[in-house]
Image (cartoon, rainbow, N blue to C red):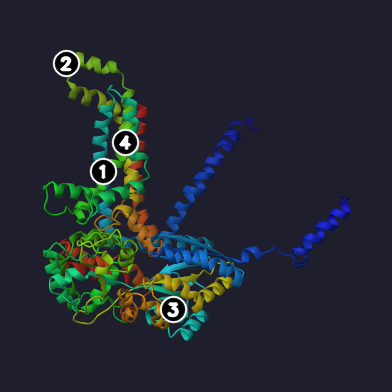
């Protein structure tokens, strides 16, 4: 029977499909169903149509959380890309202890987010911030900087920590991409009189585009649905200035027990992320066509 | 051994352990399972209390009730997630400790424990009204109140003395004046207005009430947008700038402890954990003159506003879960824990950090041990209001509480993000969406 290609293929695909159905499709369908009902913890609730979505849409905390999520994702991705690219270009050169440095660069990425977020929280602590201490005692500032106690500052701090954590992923992936670019191309461009910037812009960047796109898409998905970092760093405060969709959905769904509303809130992420993935798939298809 | 002899011998042995009875009853043995109770509680801020559970209660419960007690403790913030998972999947701990008004949220999942509550009520001088209200839904106790951690202001006696203040301010206006002077001397008041479950709402709700503001009326109509509320927000805005450490906008429930212990703030609303920590670390925490810090700490109630004086304690309740296969055993355990002799073992190690749920515990000899803790003895009598006042502390009140609407109303104005008028309007609008 296994000689039939269809049967063999199905048999080989079955475990993977089962995992997808059980752990991805089922929770997803359940989330959609929940979002259409008034379910709360221990109470089955009833079908309410899109009432949860309209309530969320009119909720100013949600509106703020949505804006925050877009802001956070946009700036963190820009910084991660710029700094990751810069780091990758540096690491692509030959220097002493190259391997050790390349490996150690991955540290922020390896440390569990909760742990590193706690460490950053200490560094930004309103009273005991080491940065405030240094700046204060060296006479640079006279009042403590409001790292996490001012809404705008807190958001930029969150962007900074996310960048710090996500940059190595960009750098390592882009470095892998850089190493596939033949040095001959650079040599040829140099002979034609291209300077370093020209060589980057006209040779490296276009060739690195597919890798860059994949890594940006992954990062956007992860950053947009981020939870841990904000939960530990600010809890969404001060005055909701750093709430993301995920942290707010948790607060409503789990802390307040309103599972239906929590599900609706988190599903607002879906169209955005779907758009990002669709864009990526379309682009990759076009690349394959070339 | 011959086969026949072996069967005979083992048969006798098995019969002795009850196999014959099991076979006769045609059902699987449930003995072992039925006598295990899994209780989920928070990591107590007084570790000695968790020790009592594990080292005293566990063996004694085994002896007295034949129950194998399995005590699990987690971070208080993680309990709702665990309870949600348990209730939705229909399996998990037999008893879950729930904070504040969570019994109202999970009311349909709790076993009726009114009989135990009535016994305690009768035997221990009456359960405090707030504790009862938090656990009674539809006329029955869906959970059993266990204890309350009251919040009071811990303050540095000598620093208040130095500016000529011999007695803790009685009103917010006086506290404002005192705080101004102390902040000018780089000794501000420390208070969180962040998104955090304990110290922020236990400060902002009584503050609002003391100015006459309230979330809703008895019919559930939102009446937050009032001149009383506005006055309280305006007051807070200047009070915050003049007298507080403005970093408090980002504090969680532990920042004030650290700031107080390191001598950065003059006063802070808190459970007694600052004082308890200073007692336990007498060698480590000193005043600037080198004396142990705990000798310079006193406790005071939140000051009064133009419309009264209020307090808010964090309530801890035990819910016997309906999905539990051994709800009967779980109730037996709760009944056992609430007998005076057993409760006392846990109550005394708290040293006043957590207080009893019934008035009788106010007269316990433990209160004679430390005069600094004495103000906590009767503070629960001041908790005459709960979240969602003047309605019920129900699901809607919990949603407003968990969204930090009242706290954010003050934080937005104090931090300059909105004017007091805008912030009150915003908060009333948000409440309106909950109380539709």
Q: Nearer the viewer, mark 2 or mark 4?
A: 4
- How many numbered marks, from 0 up? 4
| Picture quadrant of residue A188 | top left
Residue sticking out furthest to the top: A191
| Picture quadrant of residue B23 | bottom right
Chain of the residue under the numbered disc 2 shown in the image = A
Q: Residue at x 27, y 78 (%)?
A: B310
* Of the pair B122 and B433, the residue shown nearer to us: B122
Q: Look at the numbered disc 2 and give the secondary structure of its residue.
A: loop
Residue assigned mark 2:
A193
The Cα atoms of the two marked residues, 3 and 4, are separated by 53 Å
Q: Residue at x 39, y 75 (%)?
A: B355
Residue assigned mark 4:
A168
Chain of the residue under the numbered disc 1 shown in the image = A
Q: Position of residue B4 (x, y in %)?
A: 88, 54
Q: Look at the numbered disc 3 and give the secondary structure of its residue.
A: strand
Residue B269, above or below A78: below
Residue A87, above or below B135: above
* Of the pair B276 and B45, the residue shown nearer to us: B276
| Picture quadrant of residue B272 | bottom left
Q: Is residue B423 visible?
A: yes
Q: Position of residue B116 (x, y in %)?
A: 51, 79
* Of the pair B362 and A89, the residue shown nearer to us: B362
Chain of the residue under the numbered disc 4 shown in the image = A
The Cα atoms of the two marked residues, 1 and 2, are separated by 36 Å
Q: Nearer the viewer, mark 1 or mark 2?
A: 1
Q: Which mark is residue A76?
A: 1
The Cα atoms of the two marked residues, 3 and 2, are separated by 83 Å
Q: Determine contact: label 3, label 2, CB under 8 Å.
A: no
Q: Which mark is residue B136?
A: 3
Q: Look at the numbered disc 4 and give the secondary structure of its residue.
A: helix
């Amino acid at each position: 029977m296994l000689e039939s290609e269809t049967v063999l293929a199905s048999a080989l695909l079955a475990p993977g499909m089962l995992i997808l159905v059980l752990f991805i499709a089922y929770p997803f369908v359940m989330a959609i169903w929940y979002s259409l009902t008034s379910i709360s913890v221990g109470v089955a609730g009833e079908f309410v149509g899109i009432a949860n979505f309209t309530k969320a849409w009119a909720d100013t905390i949600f509106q703020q959380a949505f804006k925050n999520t877009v802001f956070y994702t946009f700036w963190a991705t820009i910084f991660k890309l710029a700094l990751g690219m810069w780091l990758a270009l540096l690491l692509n050169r030959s220097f002493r202890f190259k391997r050790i440095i390349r490996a150690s660069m991955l540290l922020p990425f390896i440390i569990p987010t909760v742990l590193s977020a706690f460490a950053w929280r200490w560094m930004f602590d309103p009273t005991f911030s080491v940065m405030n201490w240094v700046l204060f005692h060296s006479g640079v500032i006279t009042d403590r900087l409001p790292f996490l106690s001012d809404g705008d500052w807190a958001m930029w701090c969150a962007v900074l920590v996310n960048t710090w954590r996500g940059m190595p992923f960009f750098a390592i992936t882009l470095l892998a991409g850089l190493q596939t670019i033949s040095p001959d191309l650079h040599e040829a461009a140099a002979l034609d009189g291209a300077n370093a910037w020209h060589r980057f812009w006209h040779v490296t960047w276009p060739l690195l585009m597919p890798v860059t796109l994949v890594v940006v898409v992954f990062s956007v998905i992860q950053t947009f649905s981020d939870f841990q970092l904000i939960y530990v760093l600010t809890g969404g405060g001060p005055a909701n200035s750093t709430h993301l969709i995920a942290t707010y959905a948790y607060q409503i769904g789990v802390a307040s027990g309103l599972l239906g509303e929590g599900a609706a809130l988190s599903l607002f992420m879906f169209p955005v992320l779907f758009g990002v993935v669709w864009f990526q798939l379309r682009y990759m298809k076009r690349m394959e066509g070339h | 051994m011959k086969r026949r002899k072996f069967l005979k011998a083992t048969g006798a042995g098995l019969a002795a352990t009850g196999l014959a009875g099991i076979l006769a009853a045609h059902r699987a043995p449930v003995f072992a399972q039925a006598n295990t109770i899994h209780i989920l509680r928070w990591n107590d801020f007084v570790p000695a209390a968790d020790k009592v559970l594990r080292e005293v209660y566990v063996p004694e419960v085994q002896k007295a009730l034949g129950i194998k007690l399995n005590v699990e403790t987690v971070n208080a913030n993680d309990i709702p997630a665990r309870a949600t998972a348990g209730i939705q999947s229909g399996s998990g701990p037999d008893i879950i400790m729930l904070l504040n008004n969570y019994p109202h949220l999970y009311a349909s999942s709790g076993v009726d424990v009114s009989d135990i509550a009535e016994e305690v009520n009768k035997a221990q001088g009456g359960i405090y009204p707030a504790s009862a209200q938090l656990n009674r839904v539809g006329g029955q106790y869906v959970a059993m109140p266990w204890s309350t951690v009251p919040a009071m202001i811990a303050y540095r006696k000598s620093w208040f003395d130095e500016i000529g203040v011999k007695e803790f301010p009685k009103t917010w206006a006086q506290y404002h004046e005192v705080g101004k002077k102390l902040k000018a001397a780089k000794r501000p008041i420390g208070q969180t207005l962040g998104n955090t479950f304990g110290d922020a709402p236990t400060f902002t709700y009584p503050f609002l009430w003391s100015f006459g503001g309230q979330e809703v009326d008895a019919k559930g109509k939102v009446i937050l947008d009032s001149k009383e509320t506005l006055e309280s927000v305006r007051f807070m805005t200047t009070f915050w700038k003049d007298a507080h450490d403005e970093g408090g906008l980002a504090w969680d429930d532990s920042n004030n402890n650290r700031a107080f212990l390191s001598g950065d703030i003059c006063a802070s609303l808190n459970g007694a954990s600052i004082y308890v920590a200073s007692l336990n670390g007498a060698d480590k925490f000193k005043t600037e003159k080198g004396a142990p810090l705990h000798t310079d700490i006193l406790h005071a109630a939140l000051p009064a506003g133009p419309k009264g004086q209020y307090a808010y304690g964090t309530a801890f309740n035990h819910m016997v879960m309906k999905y539990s296969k051994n709800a009967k055993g779980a109730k037996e355990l709760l009944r056992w824990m609430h007998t005076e002799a057993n409760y006392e073992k846990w109550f005394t190690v708290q040293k006043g950090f957590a207080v009893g749920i019934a008035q009788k515990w106010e007269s316990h000899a433990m209160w004679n041990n430390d005069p600094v803790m004495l103000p906590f003895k009767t503070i629960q009598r001041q908790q005459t209001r709960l979240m969602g006042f003047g309605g019920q502390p129900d699901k809607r009140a919990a949603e407003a509480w968990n969204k930090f609407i009242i706290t954010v109303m003050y934080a937005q104005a104090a931090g300059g993000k909105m004017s007091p008028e805008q912030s009150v309007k915003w908060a009333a609008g948000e409440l309106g969406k909950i109380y539709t």
